[in-house]
Image: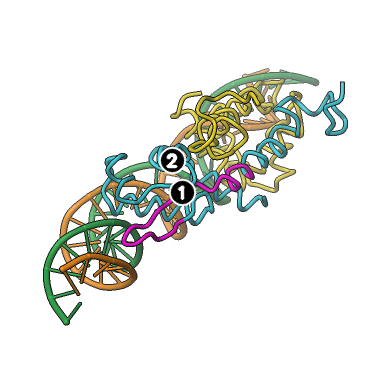
Chain colours: A cyan, B yellow, C orange, D green
Amino acid sequence: MKTGDAVSALGALANEHRLALFRFLVQAGPEGRAAGAIAEKLEMPASSLSFHLAHLTRAGLIVQRRESRSLIYSADFAAMNGLVGFLTENCCGGASCAPVAQSAPKKRKAS
Amino acid sequence: MKTGDAVSALGALANEHRLALFRFLVQAGPEGRAAGAIAEKLEMPASSLSFHLAHLTRAGLIVQRRESRSLIYSADFAAMNGLVGFLTENCCGGASCAPVAQSAPKKRKAS
DNA sequence: CCAATAATTCGATGATACTGGAAATGTCGA
DNA sequence: TCGACATTTCCAGTATCATCGAATTATTGG
């Protein structure tokens, strides 16, 4: 994952509604949920929801597929995995968020 | 980490300059860097840098300490760890970003 | 106290994001 | 083809974010 992609993904999740939306889709699993079902669950006007769905889609965190009249959205777990990996490697010093300056000269978690 | 904190932290990192800034501080380790040194390294006007530093500080991702005339900023590794943990648990289904709907009924990684 | 240094806050400007109703688009059953 | 349904796009208004020079605050050595 490149830096620009990470910024996009972080920006997509940096919103109360979108974070809740994404979590909802994560819980829904690969099956996903129709836009209407999401709007009902999250109690959000359809147009506002659509705006946020588009935002998350642009960032690559969710994917869309059509099923008859409904548009089904589902979380892209690989993308989320990529984001977490990016944060861990680039913003935590490679290990599990331990300081990197003093200790570990290489990124190896040996004794 | 609560949802509101996560949104703040994500918003703080969702910017090209601030992400670079945070990464720089992570690399700098607990020792940190003075604002002036950061401004020079990142080639950013002092006032702009100060704006971004304040943003990251508000979000709890970095901390400030004074050392004579200089203000030293350093990454808060615990906060970052908390954010990664939040994303892993709440947005990846608990495991390592694997779908959660079908499989794993509890969040237990036993065989 | 004073001059020099380090950094922040202020203020004005432009850009981008969020909201939600109304209108448009795509899909299907009959 | 028509009507109903599902969702998006359009639009305008409001709010928040980003930029950066100038003015201000804090700290120190002499």
**Residue drawn at (54%, 29%) of the image:** B89
Which amino acid, by three-letter code, is at mark 2? Ala
Earlier in the chain: of badge 1 and badge 2, it is 2
User: Where does label 2 land, which residue?
Assistant: A28
Mark number for residue A46?
none
Label 2's element? helix
Across and down, in percent, residue A35 comes to 34, 51
Name the side, left or right, on which D11 lies relative to D29.
left
Query: Is residue A66 on the magenta stretch?
Result: yes
**Residue drawn at (71%, 31%) of the image:** B34
Please give the range of residues in magenta: A64-82
Which amino acid, by three-letter code, is at mark 1? Ser
Q: State the separation of the CA atoms marked 1 and 2.
A: 8 Å
Crowding at mark 2 (Cα within 10 Å: few <14, some 14-19, many 20+): some
User: Where does label 1 land, which residue?
Assistant: A74
Q: Quadrant of residue B22?
A: top right
Label 1's element? strand
